[in-house]
Image (tube, rainbow, N blue to C red):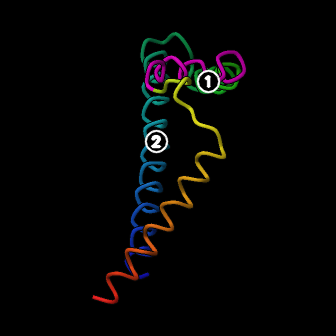
């Protein structure tokens, strides 16, 4: 039981670190795009921030998840998806195997 809790904490920590990295990387990307137009005197800093905010919101509604779909194209084959019933059956089968393994391990 202790190793499962440790694994859950480790995975949770990795997910949190990944989300923080992604969040901080967004700051870096936004700063670079704003710095370019400000340093070339195309826009004032306030205008550049306003443009970035407005167009980031617009991009979400226009492109939605098309970039993610393009990047993920070919990674997951929809033909290989299995039904929910098959996946539940596999989980129950794995639980049964692990229970049987623990019983054998305890007796020997």
| Vertical placement of residue 54 versus 22, above or below | above
Picture quadrant where residue 54 is located: top right
Q: Percent x, y for residue 57?
A: 69, 26
Task: Identify which residue, 58 or 88, lies in the foreground.
Answer: 88
- Measure the C-alpha gap from mark 2 to mark 1: 16 Å
The 10 Å Cα crowd at callout 1, few under 14, some 14 to 19, many 20 or more, is: few
Q: Percent x, y for residue 42?
A: 52, 10
Q: Which mark is residue 38?
A: none
Q: Percent x, y for residue 95?
A: 50, 66
The 10 Å Cα crowd at callout 2, few under 14, some 14 to 19, many 20 or more, is: few
Q: Which residues are magenta?
A: 60-75
Q: Percent x, y for residue 79?
A: 55, 23
- At a point 32% along the width and 82% down the height, the residue shown is 105
- At a point 43% along the width and 17% down the height, the residue shown is 36
Left or right? Give the position of 96 relative to 85: left
- Considering the image in quadrants, where does the N terminus appear? bottom left
Picture quadrant where residue 64 is located: top right
Q: Which mark is residue 22?
A: 2
- At a point 58% along the width and 21% down the height, the residue shown is 48
Please say whether residue 63 is one of the residues in the magenta stretch: yes
Report the residue marked by disc 1.
Answer: 65
- Considering the image in quadrants, where does the C terminus appear? bottom left
| Vertical placement of residue 75 versus 94, above or below | above
Q: Earlier in the sequence, mark 2 or mark 1?
A: 2
Picture quadrant where residue 39 is located: top left
Task: Identify which residue, 52 or 94, lies in the foreground.
Answer: 94
């Amino acid at each position: 039981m202790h190793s499962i809790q440790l694994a859950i904490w480790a995975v949770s920590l990795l997910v949190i670190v990944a989300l923080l990295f992604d969040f901080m990387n967004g700051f870096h990307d936004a700063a670079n795009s704003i710095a370019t137009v400000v340093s070339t005197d195309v826009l004032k800093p306030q205008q550049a921030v306003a443009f970035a905010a407005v167009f980031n919101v617009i991009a979400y509604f226009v492109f939605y998840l098309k970039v993610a779909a393009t990047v993920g194209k070919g990674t997951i084959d929809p033909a290989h998806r299995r039904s929910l019933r098959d996946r539940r059956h596999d989980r129950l089968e794995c639980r049964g195997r692990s229970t049987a393994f623990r019983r054998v391990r305890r007796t020997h």
